[in-house]
Amino acid sequence: MRPLTITELYALPAAVDLMTAAQALNMGRTTAYELAKNGQFPCKLIRYGDTYRVPAAEILRLLNVPIPSKETPTATEVE
């Protein structure tokens, strides 16, 4: 699984599944679920039953990628 590009990161919906978050962080499935289960995943997790969701803004913050605002064009708007 390859990590996500900046353009792909900016295209993420507000919350993503754990595997998409793991892909953005270049992390494997087993590690992602282990960290989530132990409360050690590096981003805030939202749990719905046995499903995890990760806010995209948390992923962007962790990776030090600027969070777009209305005044800041996104990568797709610049191209």
Image (cartoon, rainbow, N blue to C red):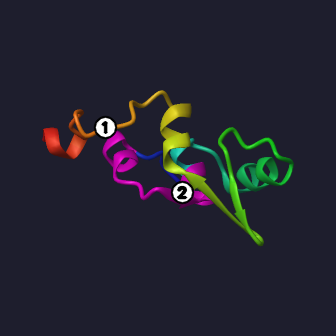
| Residue that mark 1 sits on | 69
Which one is earlier in the sequence, the residue at label 2 or at label 1? 2
**65 above or below 41?**
above
> What's the amino acid at mark 2?
Thr
According to the image, label 2 marks what residue? 20
Tell me the quarter of the picture where residue 74 sits: top left
Give the residue type at disc 1: Ser
Secondary structure at badge 2 equals helix
The verdict on residue 6 being magenta is yes
| Residue 7 rendering spot, x and y as whole percentages | 31, 45
Q: Is residue 6 left or right of residue 75?
A: right
Q: Nearer the viewer, residue 76 or 70?
A: 70
Q: Residue at x 35, y 46 (%)?
A: 10
Of 37 and 29, the residue lying toward us: 37
Say which residue appears at 53% left-offset and 41% top-offset: 59
In the displayed structure, does residue 63 sit left or right of residue 6?
right
- The answer to whether residue 7 is magenta is yes
Give how far across and how far down residue 70 sits, in percent.
25, 40
Is 76 on the left or on the right of 10, as rendered? left
Q: Which residues are magenta?
A: 5-22
Image quarter where the C terminus lies is: top left
- Single out the residue that lies furthest toward the top: 64
